[in-house]
Amino acid sequence: MKNLLFTSVLAIAATTCLNANAGSITLTGDGVTSTGIAVSAAATFNFSGNILTITLQNTSGRNARQDTQENTLTGIFWSFKDNLNPVLKPLSATIESGSSIIGTCSVVNCTGVTNVNGEFGYDYEVAGLPRGADRGISSAAYLNTGLANNIGNFNGGAAGLNLDGIAGLGGINFGIISGAPGYNPNNALDGKPMISDTVVFKLSGVRGLDVSNLSPANFQYGTSFSDLNVLDDFPAIAAVPEPDTVALFGLGLLGLGLMRHMTKTVARQSNVA
């Protein structure tokens, strides 16, 4: 029984270590456009096994002026510390509950569409990205997927679904606008398909990494690097275990306590004998 308990504790401890490459952190940033519009954004990076989920949200409040390209969130850039260069595969880009496409798509009826894998691209080892980042996600053509017509690649790295116009990233289409009430597009945005509030991206290839490996990220607005770019308010972070990791650690402690209790019980029985 003693050996069995010890083996169980070791197994639990090993499983805990395997799940340590996990955690979640939300990065936020804010700024002001050239016309005085206050903007803000948030990106939650969640590491789970081999999957990185990035939830990108335009968190700007209600705007009294007209909405323009400059306060439309179109990308996020980041890198990993210590020259880490994981090869990530873009798996999916989706609009989840509470967000939606507004405006008109010319290829399909975008009402209720949640799959935007052909309207966003991922690239890495890119020189010249803002603030020294080496990889990013974008709906605009300042990022190149390497596919024909620069179509989005959030389809396991292959060409995704084209929803509007000529296939490929370009213009302000499918940029992320604030979900706050009172959207008031100017001529550059009026009628174009835009995403209200949030897009969720999934990428594979992060096994062994966690939030402590992230360097600061930055949020890109508009259709070029000359438009507004906002650095996130990056905190000092360490690896944050997921709830299942904490539970496994608790089981390990429970097993150690039980083993200690059994050892004492056997010792008392031996003394009595």
Image (cartoon, grey):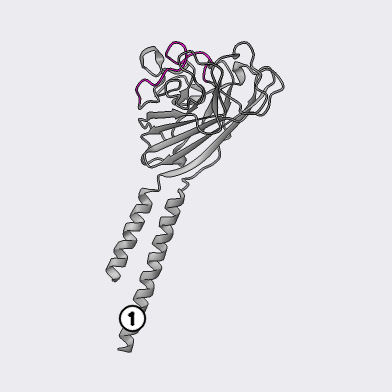
91 above or below 129?
below
Residue at 37%, 78% in the rendered image: 264
Percent position of residue 104, x then y: 54, 16
252 above or below 181?
below
| Tally of marks | 1
Could you say which is closer to the camera, residue 85 or residue 25? 25
Percent position of residue 213, x then y: 44, 38
Q: Identify the image quadrant of residue 149.
A: top left
Q: Identify the image quadrant of residue 263.
A: bottom left
Which residues are drawn in magenta?
157-174
Percent position of residue 247, x then y: 44, 56
- Three-letter code, disc 1: Ala
In this picture, residue 209 sits left or right of residue 189: left
Q: Quadrant of the N terminus?
A: bottom left
In this picture, residue 96 sits left or right of residue 268: right
Number of other residues with Cα within 10 Å of mark 1, as a class: few under 14, some 14 to 19, many 20 or more: few
Could you say which is closer to the camera, residue 162 or residue 67? 162
Residue 71 is one of the magenta-drawn residues: no
Label 1 secondary element: helix
In this picture, residue 17 sits left or right of residue 43: left
Percent position of residue 124, x then y: 40, 25
Q: Which residue is mark 1?
A: 267
Could you say which is closer to the camera, residue 151 or residue 129? 151
201 above or below 18?
above
Residue at 64%, 13% in the rendered image: 186
Magenta residues, dominant SS class: loop
Residue at 45%, 54% in the rendered image: 246
Q: Quadrant of the C terminus?
A: bottom left
